[in-house]
Image: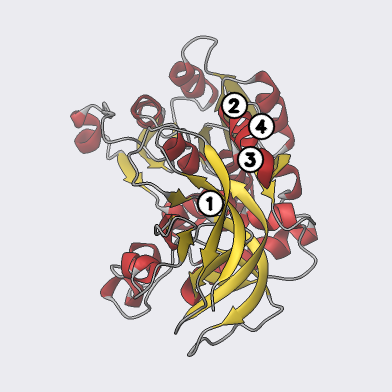
Amino acid sequence: MSRRIKAAVLNTAPGRLEIEELLVDAPVAGEVLVRVDHAGLCHSDLHEIDGTFETAVPILLGHEVVGEVVEVGSGVTGFAPGDRVVTCLSMSCGSCSYCLEGRQTLCVNRGRLAQERERPRFTNLRGEAVRPTAGIGGFAEMTLVHQSALVVIPDDVRPATASILGCAVTTGMGAVLHSARVRTGQSVAVIGLGGVGFAALQAARLAGAVRVIGIDVVPEKLEQALEFGATDVVNAREGDAVAAVRKLSAGGVDHAFEAVGAGATASQAFAMLRPGGTATVMGMIPDSHQIDIRGSELFLEEKRLQGSFLGSNHFKVDIPMYAEFNRLGVLRLDDLVTAAFDLETINEGFDALASGHEIRVVARIGGH
């Protein structure tokens, strides 16, 4: 039996989210119905709202969710009503070649798990199917997801903090620890100090990096970066950021991480490297952007340029571990959420995110 819920839907792109009622279907085999408590606002959502990335409408955005299990479909294991759960985009089948290699973020069946079913998960009151982004659709009072997109978390994690574990924290931490595998004694630069960038800063220190350089254009964020583990900061609006990083690191860093999602900053990340270094792109770069690198540096200096989708995560292990690190004080995740808005004012939340002055913004949906 379907349930009527309130949601923030993108009906035109570019456009603004509109608050309306939807019908959410009952869970079928392998699915879990979740009452949403908080949902994180991500730049990938913003890029669909502002038209940077093309999207089919109507669409229910939001993929960073914390909530409570309401109902489970047949065949669901490991989840029961009342469980507190977090969503993650990297749902996986567990049986394709990538899953068997331990690279679940590249699962070839992710799209099928996210979307394939006989009836739409969400329908508006005009009878139209409303597609949940990446099979999650978190900007609603309830969401219906495949069980492989969920992990149970402890009850003592703050709701706002829990809501950013499934994307911002997982992406930034995983890029450093899984994709790049930063080692003790190495040097790191992070370009773009939002939620992903700040998570990467902390992961670099956790991995034992001795020099961690934060790069941004907002002075307040640069000051905060020093509190979150950066040993040095560079204001990219004040001179040549690449030259500044190379000077601070005696010729270049071992690892540079791009968290902006632009061709220009990816090019800068590669230029900041010392011979043998690796630049890791965490941001979503539009296809229209070009990345400029010198081919001779790939061959003669063995520099590398790589991508990292959601931090190459193993989120069912990673997310509980990050939550425990936060509880122990090893990570400072609570302070990453710098603004919160209600569902009715979610557009103001995206305005705040677009301003560049907030680290991470969340929507309070369940009223906690």
Mark 4 falls on what kind of element?
A: loop
Q: Quadrant of residue 238?
A: top right
Relative placement, left or right, of 242 versus 344 is left
Q: CA distance from mark 3 to mark 2?
A: 16 Å
Residue 76: image location, x then y, percent = 51, 86
Q: CA distance from mark 1 to mark 4?
A: 18 Å
Residue at the far top in the pictured view? 239
Badge 1 is on which residue? 62
Residue 356 circle label: 2
Mark 1 falls on what kind of element?
A: loop
Q: Are marks 3 and 1 in contact (CB under 8 Å)?
A: no
At 47% from the left and 63% from the top, the residue drawn is 122
Q: Are marks 3 and 2 in contact (CB under 8 Å)?
A: no
Q: Is residue 257 above or below residue 262?
A: below
Residue 2: image location, x then y, percent = 54, 73
The image quadrant where one finds the C terminus is bottom right
Q: Are marks 1 and 4 in contact (CB under 8 Å)?
A: no
Q: Sequence-wise, which precedes: disc 1 or disc 4?
A: 1
Badge 4 is on which residue? 358
